[in-house]
Image: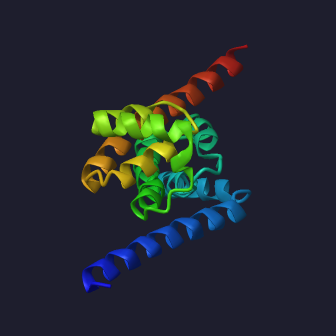
Amino acid sequence: MHPNKRTHTTIRILALLLVIGITVFIYFIRDRADELTAYGYPGIFLLALLTNATVLLPAPGVAVVFAMGAIFSPFWVGIAAGAGGALGELSGYLAGFSGQGVIEKSPLYARLHGWVKKYGFWAILLLAAIPNPTFDIAGVAAGVLKMPLYKFLLAVWVGVTIKMIFFAYAGVHSLNWLISK
């Protein structure tokens, strides 16, 4: 095997192992993750990073952002959660980059892969901005397609920040609605 190809294969295997490790870690600490919110915005950032780092396993990140929006400034909650969430979504990208796509045979993957291939940045931004459980699959598709990392991160950051600001403000308004009743 050529040294360059061996290095590339090693990096892909390490990326896959990192994704698996992060997902297992988050799964086991999921019941204690909300304790990070005691640290304010940095805690919200870290919680969003951790909950978005899971691949295909749900984590309670949006619910915490909703609640924290009623306690802290919802705009800054959204900014902190958006930045952490964007970095956390690197796990899906790395899973795709590793080329070990277990989901590559699913019809949903084929559809999202087509969208990411055709629309690139805009598909990632839109899919990150709407609450949906399929974004990890879009991240895998971006990794498989070798979308430039800076474009992926920028699109995810903008999309996730929009979504998190929305949820943080929804938390404020729902609390105000409950208090006024």
The residue lying toward the viewer, choosing from 3 and 56, is 3
Return the x and y of residue 90 as percentages of the image width and height. 42, 57
- Please identify the residue farthest to the top as the structure is shown: 181
Expressed as whole percent of the image width and height from the top left, the position of residue 14 reads 45, 75
Quadrant location of the N terminus in the rendered image: bottom left
**Along the line of sight, the residue nearer the viewer: 151 or 35:** 151
Q: Is residue 39 left or right of residue 165?
A: right
Which image quarter holds the C terminus?
Answer: top right
For the point 54% across and 46% down, which residue is it?
105
Q: Is residue 124 visible?
A: no
Name the side, left or right, on which 2 lies relative to 27. left
Residue 111 % position (x, y): 46, 34
Q: Quadrant of residue 94?
A: bottom left
The location of residue 62, given as percent across then percent down, is 58, 40
Residue found 63% across the figure and 62% down from its top: 26
Residue at 47 percent across and 42 percent down: it is 77
